[in-house]
Image: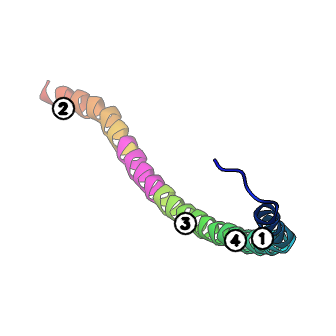
Amino acid sequence: MPPQTIVSRVERLETRMDALEQLPARLDALELQNSQFRAEVRAEFSATREELRTVTRELGETLRAEMRGLNEDTKAQMRVLYEDLVARITLLHEEPRARSNTKKKRR
C-alpha cells in the first residue's frame, strides 16, 4: 500500500470521528426503542395472562357443571341397580318359600 499523505489521513480520521460522534445519539434512540418494546411486550403478556385466566376459569366452570351432571346420572343408575338388586334378593328369598308351599300342597 502506498504511503498516505497527512491530509488524507486527517480526512479519514475526521470521517471516523463524525461517525463516532453520532453513536451516542444512535444509542439513545436504540435505548428508547428498547424501552418501548419492553413496555409493549409487558402489556401483551399481561393481556395474554388475563385472557388465559378467563378461559381457564370458564373451562373449569364448564367442567364442574358437566361433572355434576354425570355424577347425578351415575347416582340415578346406581339407585336403579340397587332397587333391582333388592327386588332380586327379595324374589330369591320368596322363591324357596313358594316351592316349599307347593310341595306341601302336593303331598
Q: Are marks 4 and 2 in contact (CB under 8 Å)?
A: no
Q: CA distance from mark 3 to mark 2?
A: 55 Å
Q: CA distance from mark 4 to mark 1?
A: 30 Å
Could you classify mark 2 by the number of other residues whose Cα lies within 10 Å: few (under 14), some (14-19), or many (20 or more)? Answer: few
> Residue 14: horizontal and vertical position, in percent?
82, 68
- Give whichever of discs 3 and 2 has the lower sequence position: 3
Q: Are marks 4 and 1 in contact (CB under 8 Å)?
A: no
Magenta-highlighted residues:
73-85
Q: CA distance from mark 2 to mark 1?
A: 105 Å
Could you classify mark 1 by the number of other residues whose Cα lies within 10 Å: few (under 14), some (14-19), or many (20 or more)? Answer: few
In the rendered image, residue 84 lying in the magenta stretch gets the answer: yes
Question: For mark 1, what is the residue?
Answer: 30
- Give whichever of discs 3 and 1 has the lower sequence position: 1
Question: For mark 3, what is the residue?
Answer: 65
Q: Are marks 3 and 2 in contact (CB under 8 Å)?
A: no
Please state which of residues 86 and 53 is positioned toward the viewer in this rendering.
53
Could you classify mark 4 by the number of other residues whose Cα lies within 10 Å: few (under 14), some (14-19), or many (20 or more)? Answer: few
**Front of the two marks 4 and 1:** 1
Please state which of residues 39 and 44 is positioned toward the viewer in this rendering.
39
> Residue 22: horizontal and vertical position, in percent?
82, 73
